């Protein structure tokens, strides 16, 4: 795996109490480890090499000091909308890479549709073009799920989904197997 791809690999972040609290990129996890803010609990089979050091790429990190996590709100961003909708077009239900997705205003902006959690959905380019400047009803299209704000429930669900494919995460996440 090229070095840059390794730096984008998702890493599970645990609080000092081992409670899963977030997912970050491997690059951010390495910065937290190097700053002495976190330690690696699990490492991937790959490493990052510099002139003086070789660092294993973490798969799970734990914060060294307990952080009180306030009621979580997420910034409204393209990435967070795509994550909330699981990189799945809300009209045709295809799951695609981020670069092949766009965001759709359910009520078009030209009709006073706002840029909010409740009016944005992940959408593939063909469906977005097909819907155009219409509402889903006018375009004869149906939403898979009504859009909602990103919640703690959504965040934990995403961690579990990602954890299913990473055995190193499984013991830190709660599954009903």
Image (cartoon, rainbow, N blue to C red):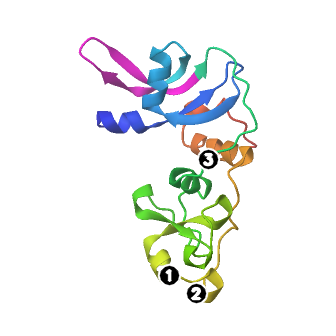
Foreground label between 1 and 3: 1
- What secondary structure is the stretch in magenta mostly built from? strand
Task: Report which residue position mark 1 lands on.
Answer: 132
Dot 3 falls on a residue whose secondary structure is helix
- Range of magenta residues: 44-61
Q: Secondary structure at mark 2?
A: helix
Residue 161 at x, y = what percent?
61, 47
Residue 58 among magenta residues: yes
Return the residue at label 2. 139
| Cβ atoms under marks 1 and 2 closer than 8 Å | yes
First in sequence, mark 3 or 2: give its number. 2
Q: CA distance from mark 1 to mark 3?
A: 32 Å
| Quarter occupied by residue 113 | bottom right
Drawn side of residue 55 relative to residue 146, left or right: left
Q: Is residue 24 above or below residue 39?
A: below
Nearer the N terminus, badge 1 or badge 3?
1
């Amino acid at each position: 795996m090229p070095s840059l791809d390794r730096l984008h690999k998702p890493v599970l972040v645990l609080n000092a109490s081992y409670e899963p609290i977030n997912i970050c990129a491997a690059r951010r996890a390495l910065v937290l480890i190097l700053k002495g803010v976190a330690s690696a609990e699990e490492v991937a089979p790959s490493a990052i090499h510099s002139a003086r050091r070789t660092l294993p790429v973490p798969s799970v990190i734990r914060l060294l000091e307990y952080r009180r996590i306030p009621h979580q709100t997420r910034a409204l961003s393209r990435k967070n909308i795509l994550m909330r909708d699981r990189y799945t077009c809300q009209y045709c239900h295809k799951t695609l890479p981020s670069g092949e997705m766009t965001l759709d205003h359910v009520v078009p902006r030209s009709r006073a549709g706002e840029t909010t959690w409740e009016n944005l959905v992940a959408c593939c380019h063909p469906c977005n073009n097909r819907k155009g400047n219409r509402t889903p009803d006018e375009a004869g299209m149906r939403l898979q799920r009504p859009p909602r704000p990103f919640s703690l429930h959504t965040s934990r669900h995403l961690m579990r989904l990602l954890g299913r494919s990473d055995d190193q995460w499984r013991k830190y996440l709660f599954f009903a197997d």
